[in-house]
Image: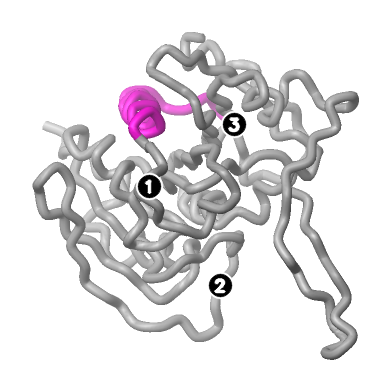
């Protein structure tokens, strides 16, 4: 008899994020769960590895009135994921979930995302990975605001995780980068997409003459509708549908895999 599946859950928003708890809720009944996350906010960390990571902290998450053990490290999402796989997992995880992130990870910004960075790290171990993000207002991106409703994103996470445990991803796909619209419901359709070549989040940079360096003073959404690929992740969010982009850790230029829609039965 095969052992119970093991799912490692991580994020970049930190161990206290309600989005992390929502991911745990999504899959707690599907598998054994190992929760390993950064101690503090690590948004924008990509696949960064800190030269001097900090301490381990044993934590407890309360999920549906159940106390779930968790581990936090003062480290980047990718480092935390590697530690979870190599040091803490009792056996190789069958699936890794990164998220659920405060804010969408679309367009060229996927290479900046700590959520996707954690997913890439997991995929480098040959583990199928789900990167989950929820479209939110920018003022919530660095928060743990309970006003953000993760229930629909949690339900999408559950459905995809169950499917990934039951059926291997099509060849050449290592990560599903999933972005759920802010107003999505249980009836919102899904669409297989490609990562847009647009920046989407445009940084605001100002020169600081006193310190003679650039100040990064935030960012805003910007979409060029005239050049936007109709099959892109950004267009899916604009259309109000769930975007599922297949990603590969092979950075050689390939078109997205045509079999994913069939695998998802869309």
Where is residue 12 shown, x and y percent of the image?
Answer: 47, 58
Residue placed at 58% from the left, 16% from the top? 259
Q: How crowded is mark 3: few (under 14 residues within 10 Å), some or many (20 or more)?
A: many
| CB under 8 Å between discs 1 and 3 | no
Depth-wise, is mark 1 or mark 3 nearer the camera? Answer: 1
Q: Residues within 10 Å of mark 1 (few under 14, many from 20)?
A: many
Residue placed at 21% from the left, 71% from the top? 58
Which residue is label 3 attached to? 246
Q: Which mark is residue 233?
A: none
> Nearest the camera: 123 or 106?
106
Which residue is label 2 attached to? 49
Of label 1 and label 3, which has the lower sequence position? 1
Give the SS element for disc 3. Answer: strand
Q: From the viewer's perspective, tell me whether residue 28 is left or right of residue 20.
A: left
Above or below for 266 versus 232:
above
> Nearest the camera: 170 or 95?
95
Which residue is label 1 attached to? 19
Which stretch is magenta? Answer: 151-172
Give the SS element for disc 1. Answer: helix
């Amino acid at each position: 008899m095969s052992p119970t599946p093991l799912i490692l859950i991580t994020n970049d928003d930190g161990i206290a994020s309600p989005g992390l708890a929502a991911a745990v809720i999504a899959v707690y009944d599907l598998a054994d769960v190992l929760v390993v996350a950064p101690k503090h906010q690590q948004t924008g960390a990509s696949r960064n590895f800190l030269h001097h990571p900090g301490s381990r902290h044993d934590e407890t998450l309360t999920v549906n009135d159940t106390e779930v053990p968790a581990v936090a490290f003062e480290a980047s999402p990718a480092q935390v994921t590697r530690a979870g796989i190599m040091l803490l997992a009792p056996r190789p995880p069958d699936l890794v979930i990164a998220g659920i992130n405060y804010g969408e990870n679309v367009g060229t910004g996927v290479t900046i995302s700590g959520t996707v960075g954690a997913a890439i790290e997991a995929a480098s171990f040959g583990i199928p990975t789900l990167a989950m993000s929820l479209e939110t207002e920018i003022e919530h991106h660095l928060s743990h605001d309970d006003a953000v409703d993760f229930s629909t994103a949690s339900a999408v996470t559950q459905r995809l995780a169950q499917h990934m445990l039951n059926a291997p991803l099509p060849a050449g796909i290592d990560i599903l980068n999933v972005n759920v619209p802010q107003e999505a419901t249980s009836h919102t359709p899904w669409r297989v997409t490609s990562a847009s070549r647009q920046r989407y989040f445009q940084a605001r940079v100002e020169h600081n003459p006193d310190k003679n360096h650039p100040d990064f003073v935030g960012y805003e959404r910007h979409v060029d509708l005239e050049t936007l690929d109709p099959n892109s992740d950004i267009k899916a969010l604009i259309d109000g549908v769930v975007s599922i982009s297949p990603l590969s850790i092979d950075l050689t230029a390939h078109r997205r895999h045509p079999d994913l829609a069939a695998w998802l039965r869309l």
